[in-house]
């Protein structure tokens, strides 16, 4: 569950959100579309609390948050396995348990056999799959996806979306899926909102 209540956020004179109210129910997949610079990433940062609202409140259900960024953002000195296991260690899981769970998630995203590879030895699409595995490994209640596939080619994008969709459907996480591609949002989301610059959000349906 995620609730924005009368949220306003500006960066100096730039008003990104003005009196935004929005509710995402538990288990719902909300698609968020809007042009570049409209505030999509800011909306996710408000959910994580990295960016505080100027006025209003953002309420988020308790539990782990998984975040997939536009780029993989892996630690270059760690293997694929340790990049995924690291997020589990940060949750307090023991080393052997974290590595076993991480191996399972890498297999799930089609990377069995690549556990020992470092990010520089992986293609862009493979690295992005590691970041999907990392986000899911923490068993998130809230999953935030920020244009996760904008830098991968069409065929790979389609298979990554299939993987994502099957994992999301079984987990019943609350998901905010940000994209500038309405077709992508339609494929995954239960409901779609469009951020209209300086005018807030409007519902598009799904
Ligand atoms: N930390 C920041 N400081 C100043 N301006 C920012 C900051 N973060 C975002 N912005 C501005 O807020 C607007 C929305 O940014 P962002 O949420 O990243 O858009 P989107 O993800 O939709 O492309 C942009 O004009 C951006 O330049
Ligand atoms: Mg963005």
Image (tube, rainbow, N blue to C red):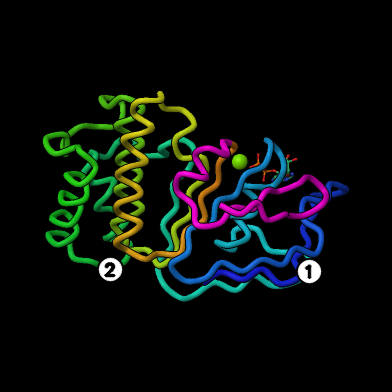
Kindly identify which residue carries mark 2.
92
Residue 54, image x, y percentages: 78, 64
- Looking at the picture, tell me which residue is in the foreground, 125 or 118: 125
Residue 21, image x, y percentages: 72, 67
Mark 2 residue CB less than 8 A from any atom of ligand 1: no
Kindly identify which residue carries mark 1.
55
Q: Is residue 89 above or below residue 182?
A: below
Q: Count how many numbered circles sit on residues in the image.
A: 2
State the extent of the magenta-drawn residues as a range: 181-206
Q: Is residue 143 above or below residue 163?
A: below
Q: Is residue 204 left or right of residue 135?
A: right
- Looking at the picture, tell me which residue is in the foreground, 60 or 20: 20
Q: Quadrant of ligand 2?
A: top right
Q: Is residue 120 magenta?
A: no
For discs 1 and 2, the disc positioned in front in the rendered view: 1
Residue depicted at 37% across the width and 63% down the height: 140
């Amino acid at each position: 569950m995620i609730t924005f209540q009368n949220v306003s956020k500006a960066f100096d004179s730039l008003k990104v959100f003005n009196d935004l109210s929005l509710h995402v129910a538990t288990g719902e997949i909300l698609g968020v579309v809007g042009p570049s610079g409209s505030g999509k990433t800011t909306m996710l940062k408000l959910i994580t609390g990295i960016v505080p609202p100027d006025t209003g409140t953002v309420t988020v259900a308790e539990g782990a948050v998984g975040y997939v960024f536009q780029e993989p953002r892996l630690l270059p000195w760690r293997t694929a396995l340790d990049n995924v296991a690291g997020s589990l260690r940060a949750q307090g899981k023991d080393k052997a348990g974290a590595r076993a769970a991480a191996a399972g998630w890498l297999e799930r995203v089609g990377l069995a056999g690549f556990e020992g590879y470092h990010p520089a030895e992986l293609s862009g699409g493979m690295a992005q799959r590691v970041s999907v595995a990392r986000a899911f490994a923490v068993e998130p209640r809230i999953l935030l996806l920020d244009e996760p596939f904008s830098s991968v080619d069409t065929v790979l994008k389609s298979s990554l979306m299939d993987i994502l969709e099957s994992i999301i459907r079984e987990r019943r996480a609350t998901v905010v899926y940000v994209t500038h591609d309405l077709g992508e949002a339609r494929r995954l989301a239960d409901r779609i909102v469009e951020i209209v610059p300086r005018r807030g959000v409007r519902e598009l349906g799904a």
